[in-house]
Image (tube, rainbow, N blue to C red):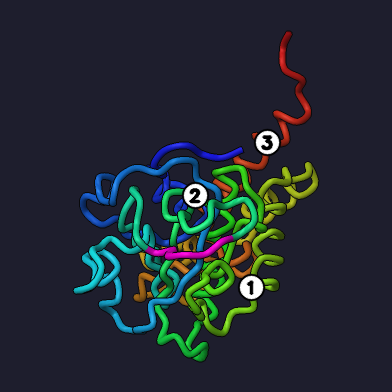
């Protein structure tokens, strides 16, 4: 199974996975033509590490016109959606099930902001890298075998993403895919309902207090909605959305389709 056509769903899929997303103006129309079928994700590093790395990805270099990848992953875990069309990021190379020397028309590229020496990955960035890859692969009906490092694909001596063990990375991505696919059990649903019903306690009239209760610890005056550790660092709203999604999956599994 593969998705055919441009991935105009990128921003929505990443947000549904609980990731922060910035949509660049015109991204749905940006690219070097249209995708064929999409078969996987190719992981890169920018080899810059600065706040403006995305500009090169979007606008290109003197020797190569942009866009150079569909997504840029910032060090704080935010995804920038640059383009929905084909981007010049793969170069020459091969991977099982992918067309040799022609992956640009079949795989989504993620450029993660990093110096490129393997020493500056942040935990939140690595977590978002795995979760983003898992979300995309689930959307196109592929597993973690089609999550590939540029150096693994390339026949041109590429080293990215430096410092990431891609076998371990794929193991974690597959675990996320399988966890997201599994419907929540009835006891798990009830546990979350009981927790959400009881954890807040009395909420005062202070708006800051209400925000802190809904959005998680250490949020007062910060606006950083980190979430609650008891909810896997999700806010109450995100936890409820996940619960509803899993309940829907459970209902579809338990109720046979009408003939």
Kindly report the secondary structure that dominates the magenta region of the rendered protein: loop
CA separation, marks 3 and 2?
15 Å
Can residue 15 be seen?
yes
Is 253 one of the magenta-colored residues? Answer: no
Can you give x and y, in whole percent of width and height, for residue 167 in the image? 69, 71
Q: Reply above or below: 210 against 191.
A: below
* Region of the chain picked out in magenta, as a range: 89-94
Q: Nearer the viewer, residue 240 or 57?
A: 57
Q: Is residue 3 left or right of residue 1?
A: left
CA separation, marks 1 and 2?
24 Å
> Which residue is tagged 3?
249
> Which residue is tagged 2?
16
Q: Is residue 115 left or right of residue 135?
A: left
Kindly identify the residue that appears in the image at 52 percent across and 64 percent down: 93
- Numbered mark located on residue 166 in the image: 1
User: Quarter holding the N terminus?
Assistant: top right
Can you give x and y, in whole percent of width and height, for residue 92 in the image? 46, 65
């Amino acid at each position: 199974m593969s998705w055919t056509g441009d991935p105009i769903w990128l921003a929505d899929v990443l947000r549904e996975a609980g990731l922060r997303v910035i949509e660049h103006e015109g991204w749905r129309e940006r690219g070097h033509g249209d995708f064929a079928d999409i078969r996987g994700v190719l992981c890169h590093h920018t080899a810059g590490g600065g706040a403006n790395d995305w500009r090169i990805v979007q606008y290109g270099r003197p020797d190569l016109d942009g866009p150079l990848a569909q997504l840029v992953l910032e060090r704080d875990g935010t995804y920038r959606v640059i383009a929905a069309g084909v981007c010049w990021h793969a170069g020459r190379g091969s991977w099982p099930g992918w067309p040799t020397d022609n992956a640009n028309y079949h795989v989504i590229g993620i450029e993660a902001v990093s110096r490129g020496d393997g020493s500056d990955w942040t935990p939140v960035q690595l977590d978002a890298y795995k979760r983003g890859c898992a979300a995309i692969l689930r959307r196109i009906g592929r597993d973690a075998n089609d999550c590939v490092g540029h150096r693994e694909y390339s026949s041109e001596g590429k080293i990215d993403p430096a410092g990431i063990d891609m076998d371990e990375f794929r193991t974690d991505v597959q675990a996320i895919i399988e966890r997201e696919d599994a419907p929540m059990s009835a006891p798990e649903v009830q546990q979350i309902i009981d927790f959400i019903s009881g954890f807040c306690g009395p909420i005062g009239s202070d708006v800051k207090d209400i925000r802190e209760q809904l959005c998680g610890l250490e949020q007062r005056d910060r606006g950083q909605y980190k979430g609650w550790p008891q909810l896997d660092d999700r806010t109450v709203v995100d936890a409820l959305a996940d619960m509803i999604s899993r309940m829907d999956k459970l209902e579809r599994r338990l109720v046979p389709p009408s003939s």
